[in-house]
Each structure stands twice: as C-alpha cells, then as structure tokens.
C-alpha cells in the first residue's frame, strides 16, 4: 500500500501549507477598447465600400437651375425716358423701356448730318419679319412631322428587334436619327421664338398717312416724336435694368434683362460613360445645397455636349464635355429655388448597365 503524505492544495495561494507568492497580475484591457481598435481598422474599407455602392447604385452629377431669360435691345437711338424697375412683373406686350427722341436730344455725328429714315421702310421691314416668321413656322411644322415619322420608325424597329428580325445596330441608327430630329425641332422652335421676340422689340406702330392739305407745324414748334418702346415678349420679371432714365442709348444697345415666369428647368451634366441615364422619362432626385430634395424626371436632352461649370468641378478633374439633360420637377419648386444658375446636385435612380 502506497501512502501519500502530500495534502491536496486548499487554494491557489497555498501548497503543502506553504504560501505561494505570485507576481502582480498584468492589467487587463477592457473589451470595448478591442472593439474600438477593430472599428478603426474597418472604417476605411467600409467607407470605400459605401462610396462605391452609392456611386454604382445612384449616379450623382452637378447641375444648375436654369430660367429662360431674354435681353431686350433699344429699338432706336435716343434718350431713355422710362425703364422697368428690377423685380417688376411684366405681361406680354407691356412696355419695358421707352425712348424720347427729340431733335434737341439727337446728337449729330461729327462728319455728317443725320438723315431721317423714310417711313416707307418700316412697313417693308414689318412685312419682311412677317414673311420670315411664316417660313420659320412652316419649318417648325415640318421638323415636328419629321420627328413623328422617325419615332414611329424607331418603334417599329424595336418591335422587330424583339422578334429577332432586326439587329441592334439598326435600332441604334434609328435612335440616333430620332435624336437628330429632336435637335432640328428644338432649333426650329428656338428660331420661331427668337423671331417673335425680335418682332416684339421692333416698334409696330406705323405713322398714318397725313392728308396733303393738312398744314404741318413749323419745325421749331413740332411736338416731340412718340418715344420708341421695347415690349416684353412674354410674361416675365425684370431682373436687371442696364440703363437709367436720362441715359443716351444707341440703336440695338442692351437695355434690360427679362426672366420668364413659370417653373424653371434643371440642367444636369452627365459624363459620357453614364449616357444610359440620358433618356427622356428617367427619374432623379434634386439635392439642393440647403438639404432640400425634390423628385424630378428628364424631359429633354440637349443635342450638343457642354462642359460643366468650372465651380462645380474639382481643380484636379478635367472639364470634359458632358451630356446635358433637362429635368422638370414633379412638384412646383419653392420660391427660394427660382434663381437662375442656382447650383445643386442631381442623383439619378439606378439603371442597370448593359454589362450587368
């Protein structure tokens, strides 16, 4: 029989009745510090992953609010008698600026004495403007008809493509022809609008033929001629007066800037590699600098590439030509956003690429 005289230890600090002295315990690190260290290591990859996901699922591009503006010019040389104040609402045909053309106010050129323009030229000029407007209107009608035909052909070709009876190249060619037709229609409409604005700026009042027997007053007692007026071509607001009453202006000089009343458009600048978002009907969200968000959709495309504004592009990023898309807000924009060239960002809803 084996006898063991070693008594079992009663505690970790005692062995065979002798006290065991341990070194001081190392300081324990709290668990939350390990979690903090792990978070610091993972935050950079997580940030890059989130940025990649946002860039992939939501395309964000620089944009600006655009309101239609028109610059009015003096219909003739003379001294300014009246000009609309900044911020004044104007209706179509309402005078924006009026001139006082008196013999004493008209400065004579140093080399020759000015000869009065024959009144017979004014009816001829009005007839020429009217004829040009008729031609431009007919061109607009033909461009609209051409666009409708091209859209119908594209629809038919897309149906054949789905049935396997047409190639993708044929569909792309017709889509390009539709874009060209849209550009032609936009130019035709712009020409018509410009011609109407020109006709509105030209004084329409023609002097009535006086009876031969009616005696004319002497030159020194003649009343001042009716002042020439520049009329508002559409319902607008005067945003800037370029002259003041009493200033002398030459014919064709800019006198005021008008801004059309109504809902503005937003011009977004899409890089060429995001061309799949440049389609009418695409949905997006307008992100304003104050945090406001408004839903919008693409309504038109500009058929000419433009570089984005310099202040919206990083100095290290080249200003490459971009596709300009025009968006219309689905709800009326608040009044503080009705500012021409107001910067904002547009975030398009995700659209799968053809490689996805």
Image (cartoon, grey):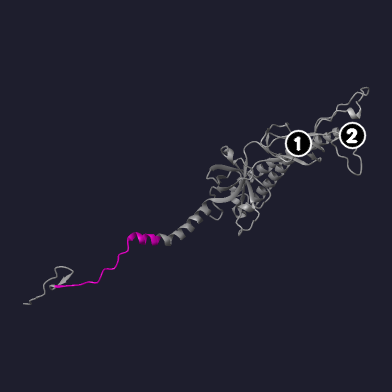
Give above or below for 46 relative to 118: below
For residue 247, side relative to residue 273 (left or right): right
Of 134 and 78, nearer the camera is: 78
Q: Residue furthest top?
A: 213
| Disc 2 versus disc 1: nearer the observer | 1
Is residue 50 among the parts visible in the rendering?
yes
> Magenta includes 351?
no
From the viewer's side, name the closer residue of 284 and 167: 284
The residue where tag 1 is placed is 245
User: Which range of residues does the magenta coloring cover?
Assistant: 18-38
The image quarter in which residue 78 lies? top right
User: Is 8 or 325 nearer to us in this picture?
Assistant: 8
Residue 163 appearing in the image: no
SS label for mark 2: loop
Disc 2 residue crowd, few under 14, some 14–19, many 20+, Cα 10 Å: few
Q: Give the residue displayed 11% in from the left and 74% down from the top.
A: 6
Q: Secondary structure at mark 1?
A: loop
Give above or below for 113 relative to 275: above
Dot 2 or dot 1: first in sequence order is 2
Q: Is residue 199 left or right of residue 309?
A: right
Which residue appears at 89% of the width and 25% of the height?
A: 210
Using the image, determine if residue 188 lies above or below residue 271.
above
* Mark number, residue 118: 2
**Number of residue marks:** 2
Q: Quick one: label 1, few (<14), some, or many (20+) residues within 10 Å? A: some
In which quadrant of the rendered view does residue 284 lie? Answer: top right
Distance between mark 2 and mark 1 Cα atoms: 28 Å
Of all residues shown, which one is farthest toward the bottom?
2
């Amino acid at each position: 029989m084996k006898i063991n005289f070693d008594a079992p230890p009663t505690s970790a600090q005692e062995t065979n009745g002798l006290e065991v002295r341990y070194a001081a315990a190392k300081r324990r690190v709290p668990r939350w510090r390990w979690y903090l260290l792990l978070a610091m290591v993972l935050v950079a990859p997580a940030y890059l992953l989130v940025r990649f996901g946002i860039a992939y699922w939501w395309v964000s591009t620089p944009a600006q609010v655009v309101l239609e503006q028109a610059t009015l010019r003096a219909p003739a040389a003379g001294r300014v008698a009246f000009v609309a104040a900044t911020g004044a609402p104007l209706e179509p045909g309402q005078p924006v600026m009026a001139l006082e053309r008196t013999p004493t106010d008209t400065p004579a050129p140093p080399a020759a004495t000015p000869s009065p323009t024959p009144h017979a030229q004014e009816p001829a000029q009005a007839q020429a403007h009217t004829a040009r407007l008729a031609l431009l209107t007919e061109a607009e009608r033909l461009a609209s008809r051409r666009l409708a035909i091209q859209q119908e052909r594209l629809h038919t070709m897309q149906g054949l493509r789905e049935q396997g009876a047409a190639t993708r190249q044929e569909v792309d060619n017709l889509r390009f022809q539709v874009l060209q037709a849209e550009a032609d229609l936009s130019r035709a409409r712009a020409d018509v609008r410009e011609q109407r604005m020109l006709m509105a700026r030209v004084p329409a009042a023609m002097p009535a033929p006086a009876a031969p027997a009616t005696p004319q007053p002497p030159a020194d007692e003649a009343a001042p001629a009716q002042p020439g007026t520049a009329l508002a071509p559409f319902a607008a607001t005067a945003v800037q007066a370029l002259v003041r009453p009493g200033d002398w202006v030459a014919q064709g000089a800019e006198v005021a800037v008008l801004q059309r009343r109504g809902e503005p458009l937003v011009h977004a600048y899409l890089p060429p590699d995001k061309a799949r978002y440049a389609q009418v009907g695409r949905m997006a969200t307008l992100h304003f600098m104050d945090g406001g968000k408004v839903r919008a959709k693409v309504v038109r495309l500009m058929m000419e590439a433009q570089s984005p504004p310099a202040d919206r592009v990083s100095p290290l990023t080249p200003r490459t030509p971009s596709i300009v898309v025009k968006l219309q807000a689905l709800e009326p924009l608040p009044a503080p956003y009705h500012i021409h060239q107001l910067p904002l960002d547009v975030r398009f809803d995700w659209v799968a690429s053809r490689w996805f």
